[in-house]
């Protein structure tokens, strides 16, 4: 028989896993349509008569606001409950997606997706800070990996459902389904989540000193490596996410449905990668930065193989898609754990918001730039070459400082 104290302790230990489950579902729901945009791109392209550059702008529209919004959300998370920030953000995303589904022009769609970005700013750092607060360092990477697996999980579910919905009922119906999924995920988090009891008291500081303390994060070498690796990897991730299906159709002569299934496989592999790579980072003696470097090298190899893939056997193509997903989407789990451990406890929210906001620059810039290159050259092969070059350049800079246990391992 449990004593009341033992029962309370066991309940508290299990509660952290319920928080993790709710945060993961909320992440998957918030990213359902954003990460599932790739399979919808052909439908939007045909319905609105868009070129590759405009397709890139559509995905960037939802992600331009978080450049500033993530910084604001990070600061708010250091002051208010994650429950409030994530809940309001999810509600706003859902409402804006309904508005986007009613748009009849390219410009109208872009305007509504800008509003989506306001709400989406709260989803990423809010859930990450919630999980970080409930799990000790020895399990934080594993827990963060599970939570971050919600992003490719949402994309994987979108890849197998949204194209069918768009084919049968039109792309607006797919957006409306995305709105409903986002709202349900956010509501679940609001109902389940409570902050941990052990919250460090906020130190009294002036506005000027608080601002200086936050900017000092940029001067730390680990934060610079975090930002550099994040920029290269997120550019490659969104290149794959947005243009994989279109490249499979144009350069490989594969049907859109086949390309969507391959992207689904990549997203599922990304779920495995986010959990597995993050769990490895908990035990890696070379620090959390080492799995990130391994992911970058693996992605370089995968993209080079993708350049030579036309004519490959179907099984080989499937293996390649899984490899790209494992490392192209899976890196984010250990990366977020690395960020959360590189800042003092009272600045975790801001550090997460800062790193993710800088990532948004690559998220915003890469889809339209890659689309522009494709429009000018007539092939997506140039895009993959550019991404390989970016990854190699960042790896060369990062090698100047060997990874250490101080990086968070």
Image (cartoon, helix red, strand yellow):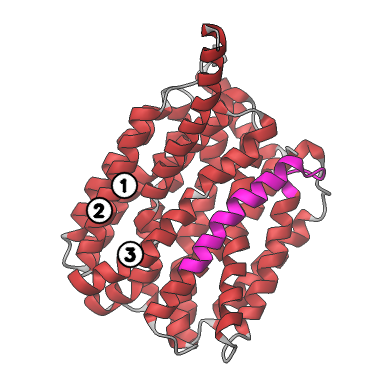
Q: Quadrant of residue 190?
A: top left
- Marks 3 and 1 sit apart, C-alpha to C-alpha, by 15 Å
Q: Is residue 342 visible?
A: no
Q: Quadrant of residue 158?
A: bottom left
Q: Which mark is residue 305?
A: none
Q: Which mark is residue 182?
A: 1
Marks 1 and 2 in Cβ contact (< 8 Å): yes
Please report the bounds of the magenta region as a residue range. 264-289
Element assignment for label 2 = helix
The vertical placement of 376 against 331, above or below, is below
Q: Where residue 355 sits in the image (x, y, percent)?
A: 57, 44
Which residue is located at x 49 percent, y 31 percent? 130
Q: Is residue 276 magenta?
A: yes
- Marks 1 and 2 sit apart, C-alpha to C-alpha, by 9 Å
The vertical placement of 312 against 57, above or below, is below
Q: Residue furthest front?
A: 1
Which residue is located at x 26 percent, y 51 percent? 179
Element assignment for label 1 = helix
Marks 3 and 1 in Cβ contact (< 8 Å): no
Number of labels in the image equals 3
Pick whichever, 371 or 309, lies toward us.
309
Q: Residues within 10 Å of mark 2 (few under 14, many from 20)?
A: many
Q: Is residue 27 left or right of residue 211?
A: left
Element assignment for label 3 = helix
Tag 2 residue: 97
Tag 3 residue: 161
Q: Where residue 328 sits in the image (x, y, percent)?
A: 59, 62
Which residue is located at x 54 percent, y 16 percent? 199
| Sequence order check, earlier mark of 3 and 2 | 2
Q: Where residue 406 sits in the image (x, y, percent)?
A: 78, 36
């Amino acid at each position: 028989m449990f004593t009341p104290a033992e029962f309370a302790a066991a309940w508290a230990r299990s509660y952290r896993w319920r928080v993790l489950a709710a945060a993961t579902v909320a992440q998957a729901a918030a990213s359902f349509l954003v990460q599932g945009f790739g399979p919808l791109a052909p439908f939007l392209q045909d319905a609105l008569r868009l070129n590759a550059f405009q397709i890139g702008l559509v995905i960037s529209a939802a992600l331009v606001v978080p450049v500033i919004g993530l910084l604001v959300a990070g600061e708010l998370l250091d002051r208010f409950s994650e429950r409030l920030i994530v809940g309001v953000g999810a509600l706003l995303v859902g409402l804006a997606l309904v508005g986007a589904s009613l748009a009849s022009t390219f410009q109208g769609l872009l305007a509504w997706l800008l509003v989506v970005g306001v709400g989406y700013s709260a989803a990423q750092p809010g859930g990450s800070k919630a999980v970080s607060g409930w799990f000790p360092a020895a399990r934080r990477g594993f827990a963060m990996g599970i939570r971050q697996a919600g992003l490719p999980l949402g994309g994987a579910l979108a890849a197998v459902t949204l194209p069918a919905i768009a084919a049968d009922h039109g792309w607006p119906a797919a957006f409306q389904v995305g709105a409903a999924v986002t709202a349900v995920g956010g509501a679940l988090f609001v109902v389940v989540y409570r902050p941990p009891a052990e919250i460090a008291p906020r130190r009294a500081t002036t506005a000027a000193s608080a601002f200086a303390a936050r900017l000092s994060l940029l001067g730390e070498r680990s934060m610079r490596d975090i930002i550099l690796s994040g920029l290269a990897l997120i550019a490659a991730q969104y290149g794959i996410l947005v243009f994989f299906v279109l490249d499979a159709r144009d350069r490989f002569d594969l049907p859109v449905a086949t390309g969507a299934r391959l992207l689904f496989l990549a997203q599922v592999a990304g779920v495995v990668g986010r959990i597995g790579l993050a769990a490895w980072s908990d035990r890696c003696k070379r620090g959390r930065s080492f799995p990130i470097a391994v992911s970058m090298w693996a992605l370089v190899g995968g993209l080079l193989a993708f350049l030579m893939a036309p004519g490959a056997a179907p099984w080989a193509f499937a293996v390649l898609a899984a490899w790209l997903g494992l490392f192209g989407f899976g890196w984010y789990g250990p990366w977020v754990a690395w960020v959360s451990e590189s800042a003092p406890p009272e600045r975790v929210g801001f550090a997460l918001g800062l790193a993710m906001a800088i990532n948004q620059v690559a998220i915003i810039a890469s889809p339209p730039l890659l689309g522009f290159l494709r429009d000018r050259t007539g092939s997506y092969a140039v895009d993959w070459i550019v991404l390989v070059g970016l990854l190699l350049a960042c790896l060369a800079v990062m090698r100047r400082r060997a990874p250490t246990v101080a990086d968070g391992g």
